Structures are given as structure tokens and as C-alpha cells.
Image (cartoon, rainbow, N blue to C red):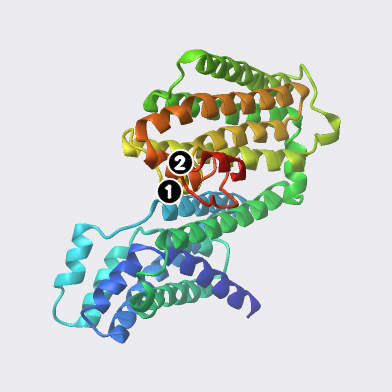
């Protein structure tokens, strides 16, 4: 009985999160504008019961035939994929919009058929298959059905009242984070089962300073390549003596920053013993990944604007989030493999970024955009959000109040 309850609860929670911002919620809202809410919910229940029964049948068969440790590991990757899928967003296709708008005859049958077709191959079906490989199929079936119906009912009841006020992107990010947490938990369990030791012990055994050095080198190369690509796309300014110094210092910092993890990975030098710990290396990897992600997102926003001044998204409160990501990625590699060479590289990178921004980039943007950029600069920080707002948006002497 306890196994059934646990499977039911975990499945309901996972599928409920999967449905937040999913096209099924959009379809539920679309049908609710034409039929009564209880009819739509009943149709969703019928369709979900059938689809998820098929899913748990597949998942239960896989669970009986394959090693559960490897299944859990694959499942963790799938949950991370669900998180990325959720971040990417979802929308109704033209055929799904037409299906919601043109169905006739029995409302219950129409809704059930529409949702049955929409859910085949959807991420909630894949999530249910994954869950069924780990837990009892009856609990997963009941829980996943309840989770989906609850999420779509929420879209109908709450969405009509607060739809315009709810920040859709925030909901998607929150759902993605929960998926990542589910994936991390599943991966930890898989590692423990495959190695016969706690997940953290297994990671500590594998992640010595040699492995950390090669991983840090890969992350550093990713940051360098993304930064170079971004400068090429945006034609970042670099003329004059200040620009020459910025490029030169940045080049030296890049060489030193990549050499440090390479030498550690090749066992030429050793990291600083005080900070040579697998836990610190994991924290550093997280910081580096966050920096690379921030850099990539900032570059995408700049490229989408085609050279125009970007003041939304990541740039709403920070003027140079891409450079923040670059420094964060470098700091992450330094934390992963702490060396004197890495510390020097990080210091030089900060100097290069400051020279580039203060002496080259911001004066150029001020000349190009005039008062628009002056006002934007007054309410934002260079590399971190402003803590204390300026009293007057056009007063450059308030610059010291900006964080970063």
C-alpha cells in the first residue's frame, strides 16, 4: 500500500509540473471557451487514462526487462530534457487550434479524442513511461492521470481569472527547475545502484583533480568560443589605444585561463591543496555552466535585435550580462582547479573587461544612442543589477551607486 501511495504521489507531482505551460493547458482553455468546464475535464480524464495506461504498460515492460540502474540513469537524462523542453516553451499548432475550434457532436467525445491525439508522444507520456520503470504501474497510472487532470483543471479555473497577470515565463522556469531537480535525484539514485556506494562517494572517487582539470578546460573553451562568436556577430568595438590594451590583456587572460586546467589535467602542476576537494569542484562546474549559459542567452538576445540597443530580457537590469557570464565562467574554472595561474588569469580578465566596457564600449554606445543610452545606463548596473536607483537618470556622477 505504501508503494502504491508513493508511486501515486510522485507521479502526480511530476506530471503536474510537466503540464505547467504545456499545450494541453492551452487546449483545455480553448475547449473551455466553447464547452462547460466539467465536460472538458471529463474528456481530459478519459483521454489521459487511456494514454497513460499505454505508457505504464510500456514502462512496466521495460522495467522488468532492463537493469533498473541504467533505466534510472536514462530517465534522469530524459527529465533534464523535459526541463529544457519546458524552458523552450510550447504552443498550439495550426491543426490543434483547428481541432479545438471546429469539433462538433458529442462534446465529451470531441474533447477526449483531441486530447488523446495531442498527448501521444508528448513529454508527459514519456515522463509516465519513465516513472513506470521505477514504481508500481497502478500507482503511476492513477497518479499521472490525477496530475494531468489537476493541471488542466487549474488552467481552466485559475487561467480564466488570472491568465493575464501570471508571468508565463516565470512558471516555465519554475517547472524546468523542478524537472532538473527530479533528474538530479534520479541520477543520484542510479549512480548509487550502479556503483553500490552513495552517489556523492562515487562522484568523489571519479572527480579527482585530473578529471576536474579536463572538465574545466572544456567549459573554458566553450566560454572562449562563445565569446569570440559573439564579438564577431556584434562587431564589438575595439579601436584606439584602450581597445588595443583591452584585447591584449584579454588574450593573455584567455591563454593563462586555459593553460591552468590543461596543466592540472596533464598532471604538470597541482591545484592549491587547500581547495582541492570534489565538492568545491562540483560548485565550480555549476558556476562555469551558469556563466556559459548566461553568455549564450545574452548573445542570443543581442543577435535577435540586429544591432539595436537591447534593454529587455537579461539586459533589463544589467547592461553587459554577456561579460558577466564570461567572468563567471572563468571564476568557475578557477574554483574547479584552483591554481596561482588561474587566479592571475581571472584578475587579468576582470581588468580587460573593465577597460573594454568603461573606455571603449560604453562611450561608443553613448555616442550612438545619446539620451536613450544615458537614461538606460542610469537605471541599470554594468555587470550586476543596480541596488540603489539614481535620483536623476541623466546624472553620470551617480555612477558609483551602481553595483558592478
The residue located at (51%, 66%) in the rendering is: 14
Which type of secondary structure does the marked residue at label 1 adopt? helix
The residue located at (54%, 43%) in the rendering is: 381
Q: Could you tell me residue 129's position as x and y percent?
A: 46, 61
Q: Nearer the viewer, residue 155 or 189?
A: 155
Q: Could you tell me residue 135's position as x and y percent?
A: 57, 67
Which residue is identified by label 2? 297
Residue farthest right in this picture:
274
Q: Could you tell me residue 88's position as x and y percent?
A: 40, 51
Q: Nearer the viewer, residue 400 or 40?
A: 400
Q: Is residue 301 visible?
A: no
Q: Quadrant of the C terminus?
A: top right
Which residue is identified by label 1? 313
Vertical placement of residue 296 versus 101, above or below: above
Q: Nearer the viewer, residue 144 or 260?
A: 260
- Using the numbered discs, state the Cα–Cα distance from disc 2 to disc 1 in whole angstroms: 9 Å
Which type of secondary structure does the marked residue at label 2 adopt? helix
Q: Nearer the viewer, residue 181 or 290?
A: 290
Amino acid at each position: 500500500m505504501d508503494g502504491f501511495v508513493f508511486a501515486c504521489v510522485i507521479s502526480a507531482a511530476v506530471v503536474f509540473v510537466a503540464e505547467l505551460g504545456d499545450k494541453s493547458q492551452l487546449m483545455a482553455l480553448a475547449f473551455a471557451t466553447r464547452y462547460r468546464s466539467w465536460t472538458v475535464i471529463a474528456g481530459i480524464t478519459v483521454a489521459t487514462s487511456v494514454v497513460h495506461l499505454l505508457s505504464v504498460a510500456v514502462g512496466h515492460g521495460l522495467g522488468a526487462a532492463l537493469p533498473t540502474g541504467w533505466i534510472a540513469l536514462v530517465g534522469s537524462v530524459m527529465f533534464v530534457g523535459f526541463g529544457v523542453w519546458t524552458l523552450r516553451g510550447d504552443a498550439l499548432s495550426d491543426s490543434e487550434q483547428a481541432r479545438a475550434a471546429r469539433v462538433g457532436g458529442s462534446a465529451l467525445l470531441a474533447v477526449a479524442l483531441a486530447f488523446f491525439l495531442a498527448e501521444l508522444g508528448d513529454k508527459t507520456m514519456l515522463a509516465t513511461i519513465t516513472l513506470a520503470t521505477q514504481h508500481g504501474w497502478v500507482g503511476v497510472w492513477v497518479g499521472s492521470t490525477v496530475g494531468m487532470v489537476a493541471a488542466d483543471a487549474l488552467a481552466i479555473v485559475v487561467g480564466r481569472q488570472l491568465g493575464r497577470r501570471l508571468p508565463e515565463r516565470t512558471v516555465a522556469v519554475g517547472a524546468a527547475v523542478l524537472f532538473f531537480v527530479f533528474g538530479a535525484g534520479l541520477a543520484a539514485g542510479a549512480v548509487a545502484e550502479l556503483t553500490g556506494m552513495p552517489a556523492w562517494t562515487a562522484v568523489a572517487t571519479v572527480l579527482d583533480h585530473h578529471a576536474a582539470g579536463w572538465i574545466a578546460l572544456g567549459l573554458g573553451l566553450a566560454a572562449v568560443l562563445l565569446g569570440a562568436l559573439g564579438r564577431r556577430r556584434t562587431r564589438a568595438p575595439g579601436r584606439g589605444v584602450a581597445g588595443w590594451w583591452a584585447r591584449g590583456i584579454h588574450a593573455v587572460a584567455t591563454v593563462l585561463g586555459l593553460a591552468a586546467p590543461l596543466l592540472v589535467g596533464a598532471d604538470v602542476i597541482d591545484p592549491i591543496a587547500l581547495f582541492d576537494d570534489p565538492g568545491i569542484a562540483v560548485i565550480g562546474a555549476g558556476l562555469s555552466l551558469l556563466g556559459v549559459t548566461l553568455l549564450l542567452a545574452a548573445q542570443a538576445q543581442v543577435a535577435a535585435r540586429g544591432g539595436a540597443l537591447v534593454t529587455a530580457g537579461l539586459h533589463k537590469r544589467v547592461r553587459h550580462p554577456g561579460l558577466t557570464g564570461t567572468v563567471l565562467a572563468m571564476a568557475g574554472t578557477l574554483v574547479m582547479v584552483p591554481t596561482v595561474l588561474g587566479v592571475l588569469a581571472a584578475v587579468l580578465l576582470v581588468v580587460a573587461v573593465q577597460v573594454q566596457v568603461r573606455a571603449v564600449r560604453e562611450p561608443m554606445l553613448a555616442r550612438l544612442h545619446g539620451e536613450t543610452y544615458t537614461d538606460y545606463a542610469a537605471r541599470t548596473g554594468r555587470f550586476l543589477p543596480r541596488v540603489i536607483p539614481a535620483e536623476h537618470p541623466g546624472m553620470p556622477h551617480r555612477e558609483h551607486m551602481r553595483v558592478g
